[in-house]
């Protein structure tokens, strides 16, 4: 979720989410027994065991409609492939968040905003 959605899930205000994003993502992962991505500047990934990953990539041009849908598609694709190979979903989610953010950085260049399609088109350039 983004911070507004996280605030609704945890029944707190957005300021509380932003005050301690690490605590918020850990709480959601524990409460919902799931791997959770808290989107935003420095997106975070957490799992119910308390692990947290921080993504150092991404940019403000990605704050547009459809970016969460693109991230969901990337995560679902990687999770399906990873599950078949026995991968840890936390690691898969971290990889997906990084790919999404790096593709966003590549697509953005010096633009102020990008579309989800721009990000998807940039994915092949950031895939290992």
Image (cartoon, rainbow, N blue to C red):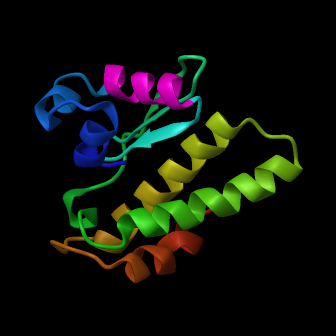
Above-or-below relation of 78 to 85 = below
Q: Quick one: which residue is furthest to the front in this view?
A: 11
Q: Is residue 19 visible?
A: yes
Taking depth in this image into account, of 69 and 32 the one nearest to the observer is 32
Viewer-proximal residue, 61 or 4? 4
Furthest residue to the left?
15
Q: Inspect the magenta stretch and tell me whether residue 25 lies in it.
A: yes
Q: Is residue 2 left or right of residue 13?
A: right
Q: Nearer the viewer, residue 50 or 30?
A: 30
Examine the image and state in which quarter residue 51 appears: top right
Residue at 29% over, 47% down: 5
Residue at horizontal 35 percent and vertical 62 percent from the top:
105
Q: Which residues make up the magenta segment?
A: 22-32
Q: Quadrant of the C terminus?
A: bottom right
Residue found at x 19% / y 75%: 111
Q: Nearer the viewer, residue 33 or 82?
A: 33
Within the magenta stretch, is there residue 76?
Answer: no
Instruction: Give above or below for 56 relative to 106.
Output: above
Q: Quadrant of residue 22?
A: top left
Q: Position of residue 48 (x, y in %)?
A: 58, 23
83 to the left or right of 71: right
Q: Is 83 located above or below residue 63 in the figure?
A: above
Question: Number of numbered discs present?
Answer: 0
Tell me if residue 40 can be seen.
no
Position in image of residue 50 (x %, y %): 53, 17
Q: Residue at x 27, y 71 (%)?
A: 109
Q: Main secondary structure of the magenta part?
A: helix
Residue 57 location (% of width, % of height): 37, 48
Residue 25 vertical position relative to residue 84 in the rendered view, above or below: above
Q: Position of residue 17 (x, y in %)?
A: 22, 30
């Amino acid at each position: 979720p983004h911070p507004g959605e996280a605030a609704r899930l945890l029944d707190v205000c957005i300021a509380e989410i932003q005050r301690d994003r690490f605590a918020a993502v850990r709480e959601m992962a524990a409460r919902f027994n799931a791997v959770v991505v808290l989107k935003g500047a420095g997106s975070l990934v957490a799992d119910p065991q308390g692990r947290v990953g921080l993504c150092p990539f991404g940019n403000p041009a990605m704050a547009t409609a459809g970016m969460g849908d693109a991230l969901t598609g990337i995560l679902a694709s990687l999770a399906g492939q990873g599950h078949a190979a026995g991968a840890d979903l936390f690691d898969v989610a971290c990889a997906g968040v990084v790919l999404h953010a790096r593709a966003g950085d590549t697509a953005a260049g010096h633009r102020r905003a990008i579309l989800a399609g721009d990000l998807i088109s940039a994915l092949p350039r950031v895939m290992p």
